[in-house]
Image: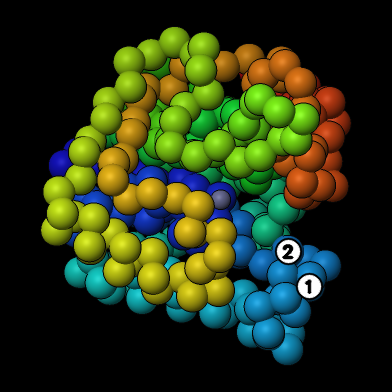
């Protein structure tokens, strides 16, 4: 296994992405961009937590339990701290693109990974797109010859067909260049991954929508984040996640690129 910096938006995204091989990723670092707890407290209440702090702590301990199942030290999960020492709330990454990119850059300079694993830019969740952009910006902020390879794992995006928008999992958004590497999981790997996903008790309902038959990766395409990932309504627009439209996200990307000099 090469030295990998895994940069994902939410606790559980890393297990969805690469859970079947995490037990072989000793020495790799799993950075979670957000704390997994939307600031408005709606998710915390819906999951029966009395406070945002409790929900936040629970999401952290769920991730630590999954890492322990994989035989990894809990210290391999790193929280993404902004320059002022604060964390990004769930659904808040798109509003802090520059700060998140700089924080990812600090992890890159600290770890010098050969590979960064992150989300594709697909309009699925604004935190995923923000994370994808932040990794792109952080990698482009270092000298060409020192840049790690950016690899993406399959996530989710808007399903098409019919009159409603739905969450399509298990495939990359069609149309982007790049060969997809499909890793079919053995029965034992599927059992292990299921058990790891089971650690995220608060997310059980959402995680039901994801299969464990395979993991899929590709080298990140050369995105232009100032363009929409696809035509039509984005999944997060349809679901109202993060209170951001695709156009507003792209406007923030343009401003962040200017501020970062990219
Ligand atoms: Zn996520």
Residue 150, quarter of the rendered image: top left
How many numbered marks, from 0 up?
A: 2
Would you name the residue on which mark 2 appears? 38
**Mark 1 secondary-structure assignment:** loop
| Image location (x, y in percent) of residue 15 | 37, 55
Q: Looking at the image, which residue sits at the far front?
A: 162
The residues bearing labels 1 and 2 have C-alpha atoms spaced at a distance of: 6 Å
Would you name the residue on which mark 1 appears? 41
Give the quadrant of the N terminus. Answer: top left
| Image location (x, y in percent) of residue 100 | 63, 45
Which residue is pictured at 83% across the width and 67% down the height? 40
Give the quadrant of the C terminus. Answer: top right
| Image location (x, y in percent) of residue 142 | 47, 26
Q: Which mark is residue 57?
A: none
**Mark 2 secondary-structure assignment:** strand
Relative vertical location of residue 14 with respect to residue 236 in this rendering, above or below: below
Q: Is residue 224 visible?
A: yes
Relative vertical location of residue 154 with respect to residue 232 in this rendering, above or below: below
Left or right? Give the position of 241 relative to 11. Answer: right
Return the residue nearer the eye: 197 or 28: 197
Left or right? Give the position of 199 relative to 162. Answer: left
Return the residue nearer the eye: 138 or 225: 225
Q: Is residue 123 visible?
A: no
Query: Label 1 CB, ligand 1: below 8 Å?
Result: no
Return the residue nearer the eye: 239 or 52: 239
Query: Label 2 CB, ligand 1: below 8 Å?
Result: no
Crowd class of label 2 (few under 14; some 14 to 19; many from 20; radius 10 Å):
many
Disc 1 vs disc 2: Cβ atoms closer than 8 Å? yes
Which residue is pictured at 56% across the width and 59% down the height? 206
| Image location (x, y in percent) of residue 3 | 24, 42
Return the residue nearer the eye: 208 or 261: 208
Which residue is pictured at 75% across the width and 35% down the height? 164
């Amino acid at each position: 296994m090469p030295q990998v910096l895994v940069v994902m938006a939410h606790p559980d995204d890393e297990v969805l992405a690469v859970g079947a091989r995490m037990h072989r990723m000793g020495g790799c670092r799993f950075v979670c961009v957000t704390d997994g707890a939307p600031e408005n407290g709606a998710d915390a209440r819906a999951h029966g937590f009395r406070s945002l702090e409790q929900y936040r702590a629970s999401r952290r301990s769920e991730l630590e339990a999954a890492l322990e199942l994989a035989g990894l030290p809990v210290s391999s999960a790193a929280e993404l701290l902004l320059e002022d020492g604060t964390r990004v709330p769930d659904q808040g990454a798109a509003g802090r693109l520059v700060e998140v990119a700089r924080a990812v850059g600090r992890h890159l300079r600290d770890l010098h990974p050969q590979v960064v694993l992150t989300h594709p830019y697909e309009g699925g969740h604004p935190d995923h797109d923000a994370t994808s952009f932040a990794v792109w910006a952080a990698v482009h902020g270092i000298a060409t010859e020192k840049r790690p390879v950016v690899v993406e794992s399959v996530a989710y995006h808007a399903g098409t067909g019919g009159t409603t928008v739905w969450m399509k999992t298990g495939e990359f958004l069609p149309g982007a260049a790049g060969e997809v590497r499909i890793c079919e999981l053995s029965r034992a790997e599927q059992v292990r991954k299921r058990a790891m996903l089971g650690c995220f008790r608060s997310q059980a309902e959402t995680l039901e929508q994801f299969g464990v038959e395979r993991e899929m990766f590709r080298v990140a395409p050369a995105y232009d984040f100032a363009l929409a990932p696809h035509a039509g309504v984005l999944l997060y627009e349809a679901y109202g996640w993060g209170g951001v439209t695709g156009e507003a996200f792209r406007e923030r990307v343009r401003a962040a690129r200017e501020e970062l000099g990219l």
